[in-house]
């Protein structure tokens, strides 16, 4: 990503994804839209810097599951969570900051069958 040279904006957003299963799902950024479970093609738009503040992951089903959470930097998958246990009807909160730039994607999936709801809070710095 090129260094910003123009003025930009900084906006606090939130997003959700309902009913994530074991199909890879990508969080959607920079337009406030809701992500669709099973869609894995969203990336951070060019000239945007995304700072993820937190992610709340809740298993809505009646079985124990395991969470995968990773960043793809355009060429490699970098796992943040790999087989993180989450019990039936339990919540896992990711509260470490993550910075993403244009072309990156943040992905989530379950290692097993399940029904995971996700809520994300983030700052979008838009330099476009």
Image: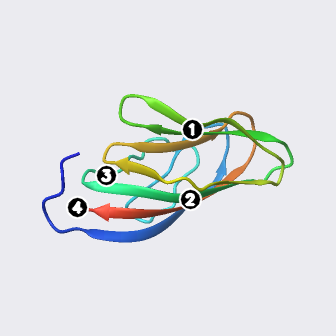
Q: Position of residue 7 (x, y in %)?
A: 17, 68
Quarter of the view holding residue 64: top right
The one nearer the camera, 41 or 10, is 10
* Pointers 1 and 3 in contact (C-beta within 8 Å): no
Residue 54: which disc?
2
Separation (CA) of disc 1 from disc 2 = 19 Å
**Element type at marker 4?**
loop
Separation (CA) of disc 1 from disc 4 = 29 Å
Separation (CA) of disc 1 from disc 3 = 19 Å
Residue found at the far front of this picture: 96
If you read the primary sequence from the N terminus, does the residue marked by circle 1 or circle 4 appear first? 1
Residue at label 3? 45
If you read the primary sequence from the N terminus, does the residue marked by circle 1 or circle 2 appear first? 1
**Element type at marker 3?**
loop
* Pointers 3 and 4 in contact (C-beta within 8 Å): no
Residue 103 left/right relative to 52: left
Residue at label 4? 127
Image quarter (top left, top right, bottom left or bottom right) of the C terminus: bottom left
Q: Position of residue 107 (x, y in %)?
A: 52, 42
Residue 24: which disc?
1
Q: Position of residue 51 (x, y in %)?
A: 42, 57
Dot 1 alpha-carbon crowd within 10 angstroms: few under 14, some 14 to 19, many 20 or more: some
Residue found at the far right of this picture: 62
């Amino acid at each position: 990503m090129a260094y910003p040279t123009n003025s930009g904006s900084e906006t606090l957003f939130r997003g959700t994804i309902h009913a994530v299963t074991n199909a890879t799902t990508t969080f959607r950024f920079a337009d406030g839209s809701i992500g669709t479970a099973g869609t894995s093609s969203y990336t951070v738009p060019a000239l945007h810097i995304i700072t993820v503040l937190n992610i709340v992951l809740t298993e809505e089903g009646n079985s124990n599951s395991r969470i995968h959470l990773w960043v793809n930097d355009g060429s490699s998958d970098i796992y943040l969570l790999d087989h993180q246990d989450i019990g039936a009807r339990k919540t896992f909160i990711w509260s470490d900051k993550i910075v993403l730039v244009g072309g990156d994607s943040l992905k989530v999936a379950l290692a097993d069958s399940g029904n995971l709801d996700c809520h994300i809070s983030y700052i979008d710095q838009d330099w476009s």
